[in-house]
Image: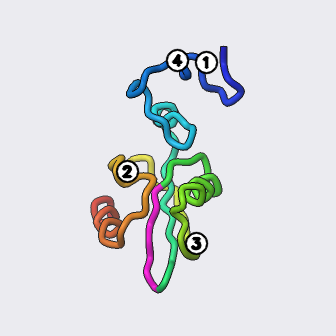
Amino acid sequence: MVFASGFPADVANRKDGDVPFDDGYLCDFLTALHMPLYWLVYRHNNSISVVIEPAHSLMHARLRASIDGLDEGEFTEGHELPSKWKVAKQMIGRRLSQGEAKRLLAKFG
């Protein structure tokens, strides 16, 4: 049996800790799809913040950031990150400081 969302029916029967959930999506399911990461830049009060979101498109990444409350300020730009970039899980799905964003760019620059 498969739910309308495409997830197997046994997902509901799994124990806590078997599969983490994120906004109703299975994190392992997203990872298995090798979903691209998007670099989203927002300007607010003369400062810049960066959000990295997994998504199928830039629009989907912006929507996820909005739902998670990470889109504070004016959206200025967004880019799909090269697939060869390995971004730490702790940096995905949250607002990065300018220093964190600079260090990440320097690492791959």
Is the residue 89 above or below the residue 46 in the image?
above
Of badges 1 and 4, the one in the foreground is 4
Of badges 3 and 2, the one in the foreground is 3
* Residue for point 31% across, 65% down: 100
Check disc 1 and give the amino acid type: Ala
Of badges 4 and 2, the one in the foreground is 4
Residue at the disc numbered 2:
85
| Badge 1 vs badge 4, beta-carbon distance below 8 Å | yes
Of labels 4 and 3, earlier in sequence is 4
Residue 62, horizontal then vertical, whole percent: 60, 59
Of 96 and 81, the residue lying toward us: 96
**Distance between the Cα atoms at labels 4 and 3?**
40 Å
Rate crowding at label 2 as few (under 14), some (14 to 19) or many (20 or more) other CA atoms within 10 Å: few
Q: Does the magenta stretch include residue 78?
A: no
Of badges 2 and 1, the one in the foreground is 1
Of 26 and 15, the residue lying toward us: 15
Residue 14, horizontal then vertical, whole percent: 47, 20
